[in-house]
Amino acid sequence: MPALQGWPGFPPAMTLSCLHQTSRGETNPQIIPSIRRNGRSACGEAARAMRENHKGFSLILIDAVRHRTVDLDGPVHYIDFGGDGKPLLMVHGLGGNALNWMAVGPELAKHHHALAIDLTGFGQTPLFRRSAAVGANASLVHTFIEQVIGEPAILMGNSMGGHIAILEAGDHPRWVTALILVDPAIPGVRVIRPQAGLLGVTAALSIPGLAEIVLDRRVRELGAERLVKQTIAMVAADPARIDPALIEAHVELTRERASLGRQYSRAFLQATRSLGLRMADPRFWTKVKRVSAPTLVVHGDLDRLIPVLAARDLIRRRPDWTLEVLEGVGHVPMMETPELFLRVVNHWMAYKLAPEPATVS
């Protein structure tokens, strides 16, 4: 598919990424996108943050990942981590983006051709007269696998991305070779009561027009840094375990997205309302029954958004699936404890899928 340039509301991305090295010479990949903004980049911002937070570290810039855009009824951004193995597509959750997979993508690319997509309305994929609803983004994932990857793929999804992965595997079983569900958003879980300060915002979400105004105002009041840190505090059991460079990259991307205006809040609200309706729809379990691909469910036992009991109920319905519960971990284990996450995923794939060695290109 052709790369796109100059789409309205779509910030251009460069291919530089970051790698830091300890003073002992040990290399630790901390790969983040370099998004050009007023002559500065997220890579540079993260470099400064890393130097401030990690004394003894030096920064090396490498061209380790590729930021690409394809035309699928409008621009769709994705990160290509390389690798010559079987394709593996990572799908983020509600309010997330492809950056969520940056701590694990390079390692997964050692055995697979690893890619991470920005769903419509999230990350660097604008709405562009499209919908950010769950069904629409499930269709986007299928189109991406069919037209961009061009062959069946392993599908890895977190939260809403896990929900979408189940929809894809249930509706298009021949296009999904395996499922890895990371704290998936599934029906039947208890509703988390909002904090007192958020009750007014929550009530406004159901009112068309007003919802966009309230959410947009809140984003402006908090600012990018506070918004990202509040989100991380909600999804991670221990936010201090997430690499500061990765957090800084999310902050910079959030600043970029703020320039999109109401499009930012419109996409989030479309996805939120859509996911809420689907989480209450028992017909979802029909999709679960139709999944034929081998499936791994990874779930943090301290997830405050999707309780681990939901994952246990999912396994009760599909006892042929594998459940791995990560102790002391929250909603985003691939960000919070990437080494543990990779150990669990790689062990399961070695047992179930026997991946072929591949050279990262």
Image (spheres, helix red, strand yellow):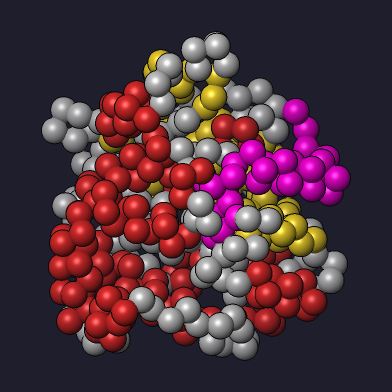
Q: To which quarter of the image does residue 253 belong? A: top left
- Number of marks drawn: 0
Q: Position of residue 156 (x, y in %)?
A: 62, 53
Residue 79 in the image: x percent, y percent?
46, 40
- On whether residue 343 falls in the magenta region, the answer is yes
Q: Nearer the viewer, residue 205 or 167?
A: 205
Q: Quarter of the image for the C terminus: give it.
A: top right
In front: 45, or 177? 45
* The magenta segment: 329-357
Residue drawn at (33%, 48%) of the image: 124
Residue 180 appears left or right of 232: right
Residue at (18, 75) in percent of width and height: 214
Asked if residue 349 can be seen in this view, the reply is no
Whether residue 226 is visible here, answered yes or no, is: yes
Identify which residue is drawn at 72% across, 41% down. Answer: 343
The one of 324 and 144 positioned closer to us in this rendering: 324
In this picture, is 94 found above or below 226? below
Q: Can you give x and y, in whole percent of width and height, for residue 295 in the image? A: 75, 60
Q: Where residue 23 sits: x, y (%)?
A: 49, 12
Quadrant of image for the N terminus: top left
Q: Is residue 33 left or right of residue 172?
A: left
Q: Main secondary structure of the magenta part?
A: helix
Q: Does residue 354 belong to the magenta stretch?
A: yes
Horizontal side of 79 relative to 175 (left or right) equals left
Q: Nearer the viewer, residue 87 or 254?
A: 254
Q: At 32% across and 31% down in the image, what residue appears?
A: 49
